[in-house]
Image: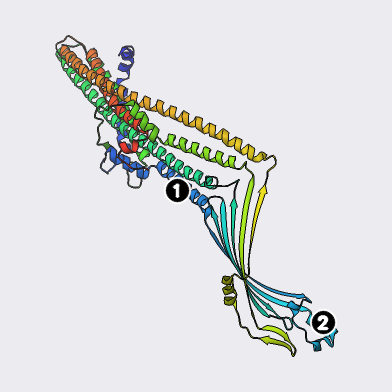
């Protein structure tokens, strides 16, 4: 009130102007919020549910786990088996003197060798090739493959021994790495990293949800305070108005000097301005809550006034700091993210260390073959004779089971890198990244402890603030009542009564702010512990 003493003359000069401006501003504010729709009754639980459905930050963050899940599927697909099929048709014409190619030559055909040479030594062949392959990579650094090859060959040369042949071959192969890339850990490292990245994206999503939920709850309580503060300002204006009426009566009867009316009118004008400012603050608080909730504009939700139905009542909340810290270490999304990043660093370092080894590979194959033909030509004393065999692919494949024509191979290949500078550099980078991730995790734990301790102190200090504010309101009310009686008995002045009324309004505002801040502190502690979803009874995992 000291500042008011020095500015009283200015307030008196502009009291009338302030009154006019205040009325105009009130009319403008009411015109801005004018709507035919009824007020929106909104509880804190309704606001939280609406925010989870509509908040843009939450909706954007929800895409990240879905994208990470697709990357995990891509990494896991590296060990999917593969089936292949190939069909090939060939038509070849080439010269040959091989008896197995051109068949038995009739002596009569050699009488005119010059005219028949081109025909005798021409090899005309047609091939139909069918290739079936199955390849399956294994997670311990191995792979196996199976293949079936079928070929139908038709030879059009003169008197070919077997004009049509059916060839089949089945092959089974196994590949194994024994040094580099040996074992499940080395071969599944990218899958492990992708899985951790997927979990990291879910942690980031939870962190964003917690941040948005805290913003929604803070905006809700800020609106509650703005409405309460407006109510306090209006009550204070009403008290000043009542005093102004009383002063006018006393001036008329001659018990007060006219200056008392001027002082009361100036204070009424001052408190009208405070009401206007509080109304504007309430409008801003409503818009902040609408933004946090992403209220749709098509149903005129932005034009409806919001009436919070929950009050910031005081219920003492016990604080067990060791237990709060333990919950934070177990549940905070940022600590979970730091742990997963550390696990990724360990996995990458183990993989890069594995790449420093020599490369020793084994490959073993086993092969079966079968052959069948149609119309076998044999040479007898009377000349070439064709034996109708009438075999086909089925006969060739059946001969595979007899295993009459089998073969196998086994090989070991050793590759020794000289220098291996690339692998050395990669391993050094992964070691440094691992150390960095470890320090990041410790730093995150330290930040979590500081945040939890600060939020816990906020709750404890909030409880003390509420107790002190309640006591102050009680005393300020008694001061106003006593000063009002003294004024009515001519033992005080309007200035002193107005000053005590202002002190009461300030005390009420401090109590309302302490209650709202107390609820915010509880929300901050739950967010700091990573348990805000449980506190608000919502599911975000």
Q: Residue 529, located in which quarter of the rendered image?
A: top left
Q: Is residue 31 left or right of residue 423?
A: left
Identify the secondary structure beneath mark 2.
helix
Q: Nearer the viewer, residue 474 or 105?
A: 105
The vertical placement of 465 against 197, above or below, is: above
Instruction: Work out which residue is located at the far top of the displayed protein and give it.
Output: 491
Identify the secondary structure beneath mark 1.
helix
Q: Which mark is residue 409?
A: none
The vertical placement of 409 against 28, above or below, is: below
Residue at point 26% right, 30% down?
312
Upstream in sequence: badge 1 or badge 2: 1
Residue at point 31% right, 30% down?
522
Residue 399 spot, x, y in % from top left: 59, 73
Residue 454 spot, x, y in % from top left: 37, 24
The vertical placement of 154 against 416, above or below, is: below
Q: Nearer the viewer, residue 298 or 436?
A: 436
For label 2, the crowd category at 10 Å Cα-Cα, with few meaning under 14, some 14 to 19 and many 20 or more, is few
Q: Nearer the viewer, residue 131 or 360?
A: 360
- The quadrant in which the N terminus is found is top left
Residue at point 51% right, 43% down?
193
Question: What residue would you read off at disc 1?
Answer: 66
Q: Nearer the viewer, residue 421 or 174?
A: 174
Residue at point 59% right, 39% down?
353
Q: Visible in this render: residue 229?
A: yes
What distance separates the C-alpha of mark 1 from that of mark 2? 73 Å
Q: Is residue 11 left or right of residue 187?
A: left
Q: Is residue 248 left or right of residue 56?
A: left
User: Which numbered mark, 1 or 2, is in the foreground of this view?
Assistant: 2
Residue 262 spot, x, y in % from top left: 25, 16
Question: What residue would you read off at disc 2?
Answer: 117
Q: How is the image coloured?
A: rainbow
């Amino acid at each position: 009130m000291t500042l008011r003493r020095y500015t009283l003359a200015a307030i008196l000069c502009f009291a009338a102007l302030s009154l006019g401006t205040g009325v105009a501003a009130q009319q403008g504010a009411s015109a801005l919020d004018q709507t035919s729709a009824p007020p929106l009754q909104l509880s804190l639980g309704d606001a939280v549910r609406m925010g989870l459905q509509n908040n843009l930050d939450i909706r954007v963050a929800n895409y990240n786990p879905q994208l990470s899940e697709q990357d995990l599927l891509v990494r896991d697909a590296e060990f999917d088996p593969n089936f292949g099929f190939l069909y090939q048709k060939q038509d070849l014409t080439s010269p040959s003197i091989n008896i197995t190619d051109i068949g038995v030559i009739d002596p009569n055909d050699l009488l005119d060798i010059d005219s028949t040479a081109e025909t005798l030594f021409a090899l005309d062949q047609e091939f139909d090739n069918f290739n079936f392959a199955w390849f399956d990579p294994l997670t311990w650094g191995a792979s196996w493959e199976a293949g079936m090859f079928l070929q139908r060959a038709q030879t059009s040369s003169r008197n070919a021994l077997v004009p049509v042949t059916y060839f089949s071959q089945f092959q089974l192969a196994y590949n194994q790495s024994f040094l580099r890339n040996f074992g499940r850990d080395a071969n599944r490292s990218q899958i492990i990293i992708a899985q951790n990245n997927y979990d990291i994206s879910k942690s980031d999503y939870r962190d964003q949800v917690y941040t948005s939920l805290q913003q929604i709850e803070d905006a809700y309580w800020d609106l509650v305070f703005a409405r309460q503060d407006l109510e306090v300002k209006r009550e204070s204006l009403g008290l000043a108005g009542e005093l102004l009426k009383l002063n006018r009566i006393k001036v008329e009867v001659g018990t007060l000097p006219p200056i008392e009316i001027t002082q009361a009118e100036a204070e009424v004008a001052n408190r009208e301005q405070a009401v206007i400012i509080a109304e504007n603050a309430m409008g801003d608080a409503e818009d902040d809550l609408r933004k946090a909730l992403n209220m749709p504009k098509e149903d005129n939700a932005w034009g409806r006034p919001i009436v919070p139905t929950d009050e910031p009542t005081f219920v003492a909340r016990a604080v067990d700091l060791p237990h709060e810290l333990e919950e934070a270490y177990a549940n905070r999304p940022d600590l979970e993210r730091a742990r997963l990043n550390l696990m990724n660093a360990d996995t990458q370092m183990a993989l890069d260390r594995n790449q420093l080894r020599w490369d020793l590979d084994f490959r073993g194959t086993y092969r079966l073959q079968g052959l069948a033909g149609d119309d076998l030509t044999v040479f007898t004393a009377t000349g070439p004779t064709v034996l109708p065999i009438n075999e086909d692919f089925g006969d060739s494949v059946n001969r595979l089971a007899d295993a009459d024509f089998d073969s196998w191979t086994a090989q070991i290949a050793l590759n020794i890198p000289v220098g291996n500078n690339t692998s050395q550099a990669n391993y050094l980078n992964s070691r440094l990244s691992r150390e960095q991730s470890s320090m990041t995790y410790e730093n995150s734990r330290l930040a979590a402890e500081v945040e939890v301790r600060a939020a816990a102190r906020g709750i404890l200090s909030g409880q003390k603030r509420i107790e002190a504010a309640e006591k102050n309101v009680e005393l300020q009310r008694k001061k106003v009542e006593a000063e009002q009686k003294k004024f009515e008995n001519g033992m005080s002045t309007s200035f002193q009564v107005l000053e005590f009324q202002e002190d009461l309004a300030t005390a009420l505002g401090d109590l309302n702010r302490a209650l709202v801040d107390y609820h915010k502190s509880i929300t901050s502690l739950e967010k700091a512990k990573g348990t805000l979803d449980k506190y608000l009874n919502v599911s975000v995992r």
